[in-house]
Amino acid sequence: MRPATIIKIVLAAALILAVAAIAAAKSVNTERYKAVLADRVRAATGLNMVFNGPVKLRLGLSPRLSITGLGLSVPGSSAPLLQVDRIEARVGLLPLLFRQFRTERLLLIRPTLRLTPATAPAATAAIAAAAGIGLDRVHDDVVPATSFALGEVQLEDATLLWVTDASTPETRILLSQGRIRPESIEGGRLTLEGRGHWADTGFELTGIVGPADTRKRHRPFPVQLKGTISGTVVVARGSIADPLTGEGLDIVLDARGDELNDLLHRAGLLTTADGQTPPTIGPYKMAARLVGSVQAPALENIDAVLGKHDTLLLGARGSFASPLTGHGLDLALTAEADSLTGPGRLFGLDIATGGALRAGGKLTDSPTGGWRLSGIKATIGGNDLTGDLALTVQPKLTVNGKIAATSLSLSDLGLDPLRLLETVQTSPSRPAIPIVDERLLTNEPLALDRLGSIDVDLGITATSFPVGSISLTEAAATVRLTGGRLRIEGFTAKLGDGALSGEAMLDASDHTPIAAMKLSGSGLDLKRITSGFPFDGGRAELMVDLRAQGVSPRMLAGTLDGHILAGVNDTGLMASAAGGVPARLLTALDGGTGDEDPIHLRCAAVRIGVKNGLANAERGLAVETPRAAILGNGTLDLRTEMLDLVFAVRGGSAVRLRGGLAAPLVGGENTALRPFSQRPAATRPPVDPAPCRAVMGRR
């Protein structure tokens, strides 16, 4: 046969096939197939399929099927599970000759998948069964025998919504591009690719799941996924025993990255003030095994490490039986840090302490809500702590429990009392012309804003309780913080053989904070107080009842009300105390040589009444030495820090102490006041033979 004849035969055959294919395509009635396809979807997935627009088949050598408006919904649900604006499909022409819809590429434009805890299992089953729908031939009285085959599926501008309940904001994930590609047109494993945004953060997802025809064989359903978001890499490997029901999860999860703070901040789990940079949290790595079902998942073999030693290194091992409900948490926690400075920076606190942190405990959920941290064992510098805590986060972070310590040093915890009056000076306004201010108390506002962010009810006991240079023992107190109101109740302690008790309050719930303190002590052994204290030894009695209000130390002092009564027997006055002023004053009064250190005192007593910041020591300052009996009289104006005191010796001379509290002047009885002072000068008091007893016994 000649070549020209062969070519003619081939062309004729091709023409016949093309005409037959076009004829087959024309014979397809899309309206009839819509009902059949909806039935097949309902039978395979249990979902209702609704066509909201026309279905058109455009003829040609490469036929294209277009659907405008398609919805899938769970029976009984008011909102659609899936809504697609438009679907474009490229259909193989020749397979139509054999009544086979071979979709080579299916494009879903602007699909929206809306998931809730109730509809998530149905969605999982539908996705798993989608590639297997219609692989069997359809044959009934409505349409001729036809089979379907689905190839690659592409997504464009897709949206995934997760709605927990009506009171919780929805989670929105935008998928700009997505692709689901089967191993072959007949099915097999599915290759997934996706790229999108969540919480203004880009992410990528790749992996393999399948094979697709899960209704017949290939169980369990294998899963292998990898995703990246905000520097976090998440890998999931495992299987699902029955993807149609979401039962039989067995997936190993692994997540790691250099820092977690950006992801937590975007997810709304970490908040910072305007203009502040979120703290660095990381690096981290977390592993767990996901078991159970889609409706009731559980996490086993949790092993997580977060942070590093120079900030805070956290470790967690255990399980979480029901993470969706927050029940069944059982984690062994550890925490380590070189000092509290690093953990303080994470919470925006300036904690200057060199003590290392080592802590551990067991974290479980509470039947009444929240969590319980039990079996706490911690060492922070020289402190060793044990106890149990209960934690809740709604409506605000609340901590309840008991802590016991063999040794509890506030300075090791970054709570040195000398630093409690430090103020917030982020951007203080300074005058153009510097003003000389010799006052000791600052007028900058106290840092009290954080008191309202947490509630506390904590019982504390300590065998040893050093406070600055004071060595207290057998200390106990209850600390309560509610709505910005801090109360220290039932405080008791021993100083040597003496007993100390009291309570304190700081109410920062209003614009103007209010502070109050009551303290009483008997038989206090001053030998237990080391450096920085003016007295050397002796036993003291103490009674303090003070109240003030103000936003700064200066304002608090200027509104102070109450009284102070204190006395000490058989002690010594350190010559260097208070810049040497008391020693010089005492030397001038009792005729000492000035070389004695400490200066021996038989007793000393103080009785001061305070009203609106004016401290009045009317015949309320007494000192007895082996050589003299001394009684003082006068005032200290805490609003201006100006004092005017007169000390008289029984049967002898008098000395006046006047001027600013920061640098008072010691002089004769007639020492002049500063020109701007309008207060009458203090007068010389009559001196009793035993002034200390008179001051302490006066009512």
Image (cartoon, rainbow, N blue to C red):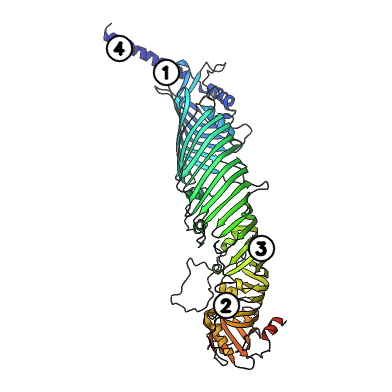
Q: Residues within 10 Å of mark 3 (few under 14, many from 20)?
A: many
Q: Is residue 231 above or below residue 127?
A: below
* Residue 134 shows in this picture: yes
Which marked residue is nearer to the observer: mark 1 or mark 2?
2
Sooner in the amino-acid sequence: mark 3 or mark 2: 3
The disc labelled 1 sits on which kind of residue? Leu
Is the residue under label 2 in contact with that under label 1 (CB below 8 Å)? no
Q: For the residues marked 1 and 2, what is the alpha-carbon distance in whole angstroms?
A: 105 Å
Q: For the residues marked 3 and 2, what is the alpha-carbon distance in whole angstroms?
A: 27 Å
Mark number displayed over residue 534:
2
- Residue designated by label 1: 94
Q: Residues within 10 Å of mark 1 (few under 14, many from 20)?
A: many
Q: Is residue 410 above or below residue 156?
A: below
Q: For the residues marked 2 and 4, what is the alpha-carbon distance in whole angstroms?
A: 119 Å
Q: Quadrant of the C terminus?
A: bottom right
In this rendered view, identify the residue nearer to me: 60 or 120.
120
Which marked residue is nearer to the observer: mark 3 or mark 1?
3
The disc labelled 3 sits on which kind of residue? Ala
Sooner in the amino-acid sequence: mark 4 or mark 3: 4
- Residue designated by label 3: 476
- Which element type, helix, strand or loop, lies under badge 2? loop
Q: For the residues marked 4 and 3, what is the alpha-carbon distance in whole angstroms?
A: 106 Å
In this rendered view, identify the residue nearer to me: 671 or 377.
377
Q: For the residues marked 1 and 4, what is the alpha-carbon distance in whole angstroms?
A: 21 Å
Which marked residue is nearer to the observer: mark 2 or mark 4?
2
